[in-house]
Image (tube, grey):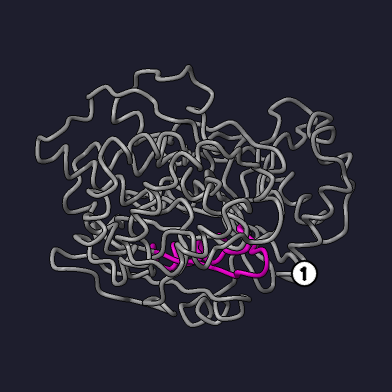
Amino acid sequence: MTPILTLGAMLLAAQPSLARPQPQAAPTAAITPAPAFKARLGQLVALLNGGGTYDDLFSPAFRQAVPQAQFQTYVDQLKAQGGTATGIESISASTPWQATVTIGYQRIVATMLVAVDPAAPHAITGLRITTAEPRNDSLAKLEADFARLHGSAGFGIYALGDNGVTPVAELNDDTAAPLGSAFKLWVLAEAARETGAGERHWEDVVHVGRPSLPSGILREWPAHAPVTLQTLATLMISISDNTAADTLLTTLGQAKVGAMVRTIGVADPDRTLPVLTTMQAFELKAPAHAALADAWAKDSPAERGQLLADNAAAFDATPIDPQMFAGKPLRTDSVEWFASPEDMAKTLNWLRLHGDATTRAILAVNHGTDPATAGRFAYVGFKGGSEPGVVTLNYLVRSKAGHWYAVAGNWHDPDAAVSTPDFAALMNRALRLVAG
């Protein structure tokens, strides 16, 4: 249940950032890149094709941060995916010495953030690959690439309206899969309902509850520290803080969050209910509680609720080893939270229709995609989730033309690890197709 924080440039199954230029304010008029900047771009294309000299092109600080051998791995991956680099296709400058650059390859188009030192000899000081997408991408190509994933995978793109969600593209979109931390969207929905009804207020103060395992920061805070509901919700969604999620879930009430799952219209709520806290999920997955986990998989929601109540003391008394998540997937087909891409689209649409401005702001703290892709939309809200064998990414987006969409997908293999970078690459392609 690790958080998905930033997911840029994930077509490469590698760390996407070589070195990161500092962000600049949005330009108010077209900016012309310096001639020396454009000259360096030409030399970069040559280097990507095996020519030129690495030491001459990059600054000493860059070379120290990114040794040539490391840089070459990125070059080789781009070449394996795209073939030969064919040249610069566009330059969008934020200053004369920094720009978003698209470099064409035979089979892909790579987008990079490039920064060049204004002082002679004008070495490249920053380079970050943000996207690498197939040429002439299409929904059919995307669906085919999803279908090649091992285990099971599904995605859906949905137009959102006042009366529901309408599929634009889909693959196994009605098949429920484990969500990891994406279940926290249901907790946010119940918080939005209660604050919207005046039952609670975002500024209400509660005390941090029992620490959960990472991810997050609240587990390190002083015991019972006071926080607002908005703080809990923001940490829960933006950095997937598990302690924040558990505190908010128990404050609202597991029964009420379970009722929200039914209100949203999740197709098979009984597979999930009652909605576990993250710590309860960890405790059930622990090898010491294998018999309880077996029972959980067979029980009805009411019986599961009783199981949690009857064994609360035993759970509290059993230390949980975080390293149990370092290996193979652990009960991902039974002790989890389950929903299909269509279910998650319904969840996002409920939040869009019934959440207030604070709800939408919380969803948008972490876009879950690279800045170039996020910049193609007027709004991007996001929540993902992952653990060994599980990854799910869910986006609520508004196009610059004013249309709302949900883009939701999952990949699950109960017997093997799944690649979050590879999956994020597919989902980013879906986002770019929606933006187009």
Q: Residue at x 48, y 77 (%)?
A: 138
Q: Where residue 339 appears, x then y in whole percent?
A: 38, 66
Nearer to me, 370 or 79: 370
Q: Is residue 88 left or right of residue 154?
A: right
Q: Where residue 354 appears, x then y in whole percent?
A: 16, 50
Classify the position of the C terminus by image quarter: bottom left
The residue that disc 1 covers is 80
Q: Is residue 226 visible?
A: yes
The amino acid pointed to by label 1 is: Ala
> Is the residue marked by circle 1 packed among few (<14), some (14-19), or many (20+) residues within 10 Å?
few
Report if residue 207 lies within the magenta region.
no
Task: Point out the stretch of residues depicted in magenta.
Answer: 408-436
Nearer to me, 145 or 303: 303
Q: Residue at x 38, y 64 (%)?
A: 407
Residue 107, quarter of picture = bottom right
Which element type, helix, strand or loop, lies under badge 1?
Answer: helix
Nearer to me, 47 or 5: 5
Q: Where residue 45 appears, x then y in whole percent?
A: 75, 56
